[in-house]
């Protein structure tokens, strides 16, 4: 496909030339959002189910739009991926998390934060050096980060993804397969990747109470992960009953509204403080 160079990191397909004025205006609004600090880092706690030490959270972006209010990521991430803008968003996110990990308020928490990577990031040859640069500037280790990658992002170009994941793993980043069970990756293939964690997609976790099929998928995924020597996380835990069932099934960690919603940084730190005193 014909690719044309836009300012800095942006690239787009020729088919995009016919894009509507609305699309272009969203792109310029997104650029404006980064420059004018309208993006917000939210953190959702990820808790251990068997008393392991350390604290963890997933970093999730929100857009505090001056007119539209708090815009959820599904309203702009797909667009950001399509235009390639997501790479700037990833670096912004990574920088915010690095700043948080260097913040005196998080010292002593042994906090590990997961950051979502997109398909575009996996194809960006400069990703690993850009991330290394951010780590050095903030003086934080790669091991404090987990990078979440979906199966479909990997299967988009498996060979390039594998090379990139090997490189990120050698740098010291922990790697997680997000939305596990929704893609079409082969197990034989996943086994080759330097992955540390599987994250069971919330559609299966949320269906556990009502659907025996979903419960069976969750159970087999936990066993599979453990047989491959991986940590397994359930996302979308909305009820106490599901949390208990996951504990019984020996799932390692859980994340979901029942435990905590994604929170702004100050609220997240207050939540952690509250946990420590329970
Ligand atoms: P994801 O990576 O699968 O993130 C989990 C989503 O599930 C989050 O939605 C979270 O708020 C939501 N969630 C957590 N617990 C529950 C629960 O108990 N019930 C339900 N129904 N939902 C729950 P969110 O924050 O709206 O993000 C949606 C998606 O947008 C993310 O899905 C991810 O694909 C993307 N995204 C968010 N932030 C970023 C980012 O910084 N970079 C990239 N590349 N993608 C991001
Ligand atoms: Ca994720
Ligand atoms: Ca997910
Ligand atoms: Ca998802």
Image (cartoon, grey):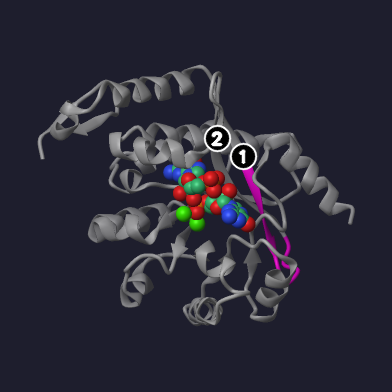
Camera sees residue 103: yes
The response on whether ligand 1 sits within 8 Å of label 2 is: yes
For the N terminus, which image quadrant?
top left
Q: Please indicate whether residue 17 sits to the left or right of residue 70 in the image.
A: left
Please check the rendered image and state whether residue 205 is part of the magenta-colored stretch, yes or no.
no
Which residue extends farthest left?
2
Q: CA distance from mark 1 to mark 2?
A: 7 Å
Q: Residue at x 73, y 62 (%)?
A: 53
Q: Please indicate whether residue 54 sits to the left or right of residue 166 in the image.
A: right
Please check the rendered image and state whether residue 49 is part of the magenta-colored stretch, yes or no.
yes
Q: Which residue is mark 1?
A: 42
Front residue of 80 and 53: 80
Front residue of 146 and 275: 275
Quadrant in the picture for residue 257: bottom right
Q: Position of residue 44 (x, y in %)?
A: 64, 48
Range covered by the magenta-colored residues: 42-53
The response on whether ligand 1 sits within 8 Å of label 1 is: yes
């Amino acid at each position: 496909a014909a690719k044309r160079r836009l300012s800095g990191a942006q690239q787009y397909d020729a088919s995009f030339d016919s894009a509507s004025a609305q699309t272009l205006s969203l792109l310029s609004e997104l650029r404006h959002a980064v420059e004018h600090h309208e993006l917000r880092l939210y953190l959702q706690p990820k808790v251990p189910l068997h008393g392991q030490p350390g604290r963890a959270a997933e970093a999730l972006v929100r857009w505090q739009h001056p007119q539209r209010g708090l815009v959820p990521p599904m309203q702009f991430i797909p667009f950001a991926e399509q235009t390639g803008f997501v790479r700037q968003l990833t670096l912004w996110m990574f920088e915010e998390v690095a700043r948080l990990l260097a913040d005196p308020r998080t010292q002593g928490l042994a906090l590990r934060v997961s950051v979502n990577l997109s398909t575009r990031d996996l194809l960006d040859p400069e990703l690993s050096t850009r991330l290394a640069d951010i780590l050095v500037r903030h003086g934080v280790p790669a091991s404090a980060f987990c990078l979440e990658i979906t199966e479909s992002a990997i299967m988009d170009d498996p060979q390039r993804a594998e090379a990139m994941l090997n490189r990120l793993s050698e740098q010291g980043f922990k790697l997680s397969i997000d939305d596990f069970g929704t893609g079409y990756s082969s197990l034989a293939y996943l086994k080759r990747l330097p992955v540390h964690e599987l994250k069971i997609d919330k559609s299966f976790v949320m269906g556990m109470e009502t659907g025996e099929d979903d419960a069976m998928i969750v159970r087999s995924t936990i066993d599979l992960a453990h047989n491959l020597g991986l940590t397994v996380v359930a996302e979308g835990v909305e009820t106490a009953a599901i949390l208990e069932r996951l504990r019984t099934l020996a799932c390692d960690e859980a994340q979901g509204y029942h435990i905590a919603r994604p929170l702004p940084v100050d609220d997240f730190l207050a939540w952690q403080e509250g946990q420590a005193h329970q």
